[in-house]
Amino acid sequence: MYQIKKWKKLLLYVLLVCMIQTTALPFIPSVTVEAAVKNGLKTENGKLYYYKNGVKVTKQLIRINAAKIYFFGSNGSAVTNTFKKIVDLDGRKYGFYFGATGKAIVAPKVLGQEKNFVVKKINGVYYGFDTLGHLIRGMWVDSEKGTLSFFDTNGAYNAAQTKTLRAAIRKFYGKKPASETGYKNVYTYLKTALGKHKVIKTSSCMIWGKPTDGYTDVTMQFTNFCILLIRNNRTKQYYFYDIYSR
């Protein structure tokens, strides 16, 4: 009987020790470690790539922000030092130039002007680019300087045509009529020199003749810029007041 009681006490002691040890052990949850999925711009072996959910983007134009525009080729790397014609967000095809870092040349917006442009020398030729990175063509006006420039159909700056157009602008720009027969032909002259445009007329607060004459703002709206003329309603003369980017 004594041996049985001793054996039971020993068994009880062992059970108590096991319970204490089991209670003291901390709970360690199982953890699954997953590799981070690549996203965004990544430089690998000296080349720039763009990932979406771990997959390299290929044959696609990517706009990181207004100043960072890239094109990733068939192997996924950003193209560099090259011109390319690419379909943009509006579904139309435009010319771009991607420099040594892969970034497209992009003009900054000045005072919110969408039609600002920048000129860059590439392989000995000057080219114009707008705020979307597109090669430009035709007549453009610098948002800060107010000077007009002309670009050929391939985006190259045309110095001869620019000189001709600037001379046409200077003929009447900022000059108020000195007589009642002075500048009646200003609108016709500019229309002939600059070509197709839209006319917007509003009442004017500008007075450069008699206050009782009445005045009209005549805006010549071209594709990329505007010219503001002030018309004297009595004398039919025009004052070439301003030229500015749209």
Image: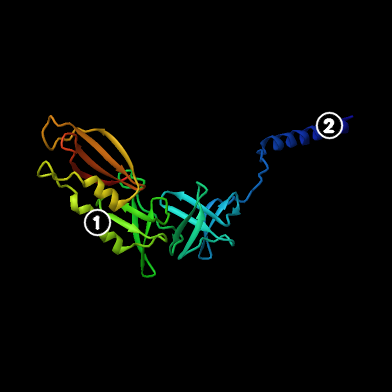
Give the amino acid at mark 1. Arg
The reply to whether the C-beta atoms of the residues labelled 2 and 1 are less than 8 Å apart is no
How many dots with numbers? 2
Horizontal and vertical percent position of residue 235: 15, 37
Q: Secondary structure at mark 1?
A: helix
Way the structure is coloured: rainbow
Q: Is residue 164 above or below residue 196?
A: below
Q: In front here: 226 or 121? A: 226
Label 1 Cα crowd, 10 Å radius (few <14 / some 14-19 / many 20+): some
Spatial separation of the CA atoms under disc 2 and disc 1:
113 Å
Horizontal and vertical percent position of residue 132: 42, 50
Of the 4 image quadrants, the one containing the N terminus is: top right
Horizontally, residue 137 falls left or right of residue 231, namely right
Horizontally, residue 98 falls left or right of residue 166, namely right
Horizontally, residue 236 falls left or right of residue 123, namely left
Q: Residue 166 has which mark?
A: 1
Give the amino acid at mark 2. Lys
Q: Residue 8 has which mark?
A: 2
